[in-house]
Amino acid sequence: MNNNNSGNKVQHIMTKNVATVSPNQTVQEAAQIMSQKNIGALPVVENGQVKGMITDRDITLRTSAQGKDPASTPVSEVMTNRVITGTPDMSVQEAANVMAQHQVRRLPIVENNQLQGMVALGDIATNSASDEAAGQALTNISEPSQPQG
């Protein structure tokens, strides 16, 4: 039963032209895309399907810290395989809840197994400023990531 009278759908706030990287591209290529786009995460996409996510943190911890060569290491070796996704017709509130539950800051939006867009915490904050639950989700996700000491 979908009685959603609580505002916007994800499709109205998601970024539609999402920068992506393929599993067989190198970590260095992924880092270059992140640098050019000024973003910290990329969905790893093959034939339109989300296969994983790679973040600047993945690159640091799973490549640099382990002495792997970013120019020869494929993205598939360091990406996160288990990706939490949303759908274009879910409400912004549902997306906020999913992100809070799984402690993720970015939610790839998938329909018919194809990447349609991406929703970030900032998108939800901007579009749900008055929504207390979305604000709570943001607080829960943001707190643990603050630098310690």
Image (cartoon, rainbow, N blue to C red):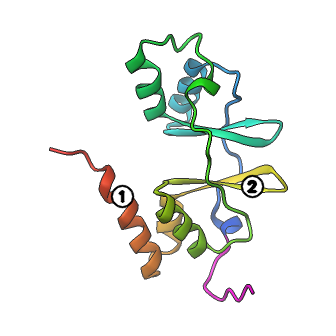
Residue 67 is covered by the magenta coloring? no
Going by the image, does 4 lie left or right of 67? right
- Viewer-side residue, 80 vs 106: 80
Q: Residues within 10 Å of mark 2 (few under 14, many from 20)?
A: some
What segment is highlighted magenta in the picture? Answer: 1-9
Q: Residues within 10 Å of mark 1 (few under 14, many from 20)?
A: some
Residue holding disc 2: 110
Residue holding disc 1: 142
Residue 69 percent coordinates (x, y): 50, 10
Q: Secondary structure at mark 2?
A: strand
Tell me, for residue 134, which label it has, or none: none
- Viewer-side residue, 92 vs 81: 81
Q: Give, as a three-letter code, the residue at label 2.
A: Val
Residue that appears at 67% across and 44% down: 18
Q: Could you give the CA–CA distance between mark 1 and mark 2, rounded to whole angstroms?
A: 24 Å
Q: Give, as a three-letter code, the residue at label 1.
A: Ser
Image quarter of residue 14:
bottom right
